[in-house]
Amino acid sequence: MVSKDEDVKPVKLSSRDKAAATDTTARAIISAETVAREKKTEKLRALRLAQPHAEIPQKRRRK
């Protein structure tokens, strides 16, 4: 156990370790955003397919 009198210095990370930590965090965020986007896309696709098809009016031809 560390007493109050002992100085505890944080361990300095090397630039390689900092870059690795940043890379890991960024990849986790990107992955989470991708999953959320795909879930939203599937939900919207299901809602769109559940709607009845609207007929597109035909353009009248001039005689």
Image (tube, rainbow, N blue to C red):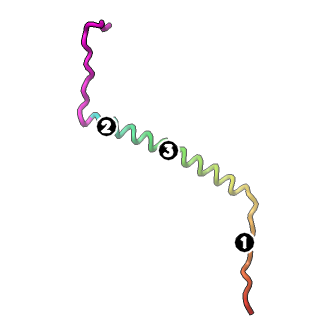
Q: State which quadrant residue 15 falls in.
A: top left
The residue tagged 3 is 33
- 12 sits left or right of 59 in the view: left
Find out whether residue 10 is within the magenta segment: yes
Residue drawn 59% across the image and 48% down it: 40
Q: Are marks 1 and 3 in contact (CB under 8 Å)?
A: no
- Tell me residue 23's x, y (percent): 35, 40
Q: Is residue 29 above or below residue 12?
A: below
Work out whether mark 1 precedes mark 3 in sequence or the reverse, and give the earlier one: 3
Residue type of the residue flagged with mark 3:
Glu
Q: Main secondary structure of the magenta part?
A: loop
- 58 sits left or right of 10 in the view: right
Find out whether residue 13 is within the magenta segment: yes
The residue tagged 1 is 56
Residue drawn 75% across the image and 69% down it: 55
Q: Are marks 3 and 2 in contact (CB under 8 Å)?
A: no
Q: Are marks 1 and 2 in contact (CB under 8 Å)?
A: no
Residue type of the residue flagged with mark 2:
Ala
Residue type of the residue flagged with mark 1:
Ile
Q: State which quadrant residue 26 falls in.
A: top left
Work out whether mark 1 precedes mark 2 in sequence or the reverse, and give the earlier one: 2
- 50 sits left or right of 18 in the view: right
Q: Is residue 14 above or below residue 52?
A: above
